[in-house]
Amino acid sequence: MNQLPRERANAAVREFLSSHDWSTQTPARRRILSAFLELATTRGFESVTMRTLGRELNMKAPSLYSSFPQGKDEIVAESLRWFTHSFARDLLAAAEETESAEDYWAALVRFHLAQQLQRPEADLWDLLVATDRVGRFLSDDVRDEVGFWSSLHEDMYAAAAEEMGYRLPPQSIRLIFTLLDGAGRWADWSGNDADLPELLDNAVALSRSIFRVSSGIHTPA
């Protein structure tokens, strides 16, 4: 039996996730990564140094460097990887619970927006990736991994559109990502979880509007 497009997209994400074994991450490295993400999202990326990390964790510099010999650059790269894999894993779990292409699409949008609003690390991820496009501070392998995940993420949306009988241009998918990534500037979320479902519904409707325009569809969602 032939796989549905979303099944193929899901399988590709599962293969991506299998490329890194996070169970080998030591407790010390996990603590450092968590502290870095917390500090970077609350105080700003540039303000985080090995010294401020050490103070936050009550760790001496030799202990930090024993876990991350290359210092902050290595911590940044591993944090990007960690967040990327965490996002991909949880998104896949949400997508796999759906039974139709329409519900699959909605799950992708809802998850993305909820992450963007509820996890400050999402904005940090966006900032670091955007900064690397200009400053090229990431290693080639990390840049390639992040880029590969972005293509897989886009493929999930394209798969949903294909199952609904349409071809969604990559530019339109990126426009939807821009909408969701910028949710903090337009969603006006109160921070109350009770208000979140309405915002998620609105995001799905907005994304489907982009979908309809891009695909030449003019019927109601």
Image: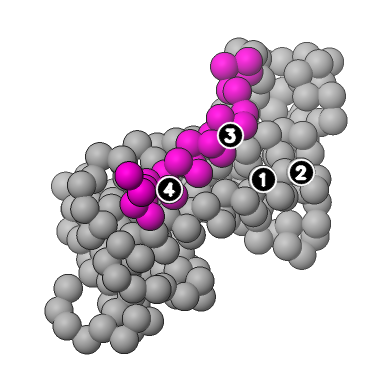
Q: Which of marks 3 and 2 is in front?
A: 2
* Pointer 1 residue: 145
Tag count in the figure? 4
Q: Residue at 29% x, 70% y: name it.
A: 165
Q: For residue 76, which quarter of the picture?
A: top right
- Cα separation, mark 1 vs mark 3, equals 11 Å
* Pointer 3 residue: 82
What's under tag 3, amino acid-wise?
Trp
Q: What SS does tag 3 mark?
A: helix
Is 68 covered by the magenta stretch? no
- Cα separation, mark 3 vs mark 4, equals 24 Å
Kindly report the secondary structure that dominates the magenta region of the rendered protein.
Answer: helix
* Of callouts 3 and 4, the N-terminal one: 4
Is residue 221 positioned above or below 188 on the image? below
The magenta stretch spans which residues? 1-25
Q: Are marks 3 and 4 in contact (CB under 8 Å)?
A: no
Q: What SS does tag 2 mark?
A: helix
* Pointer 2 residue: 141
**Residue 179, position as x, y percentages in the image:** 42, 68
Q: In which quarter of the image is the C terminus?
A: bottom left
Q: For residue 62, which quarter of the picture?
A: top right
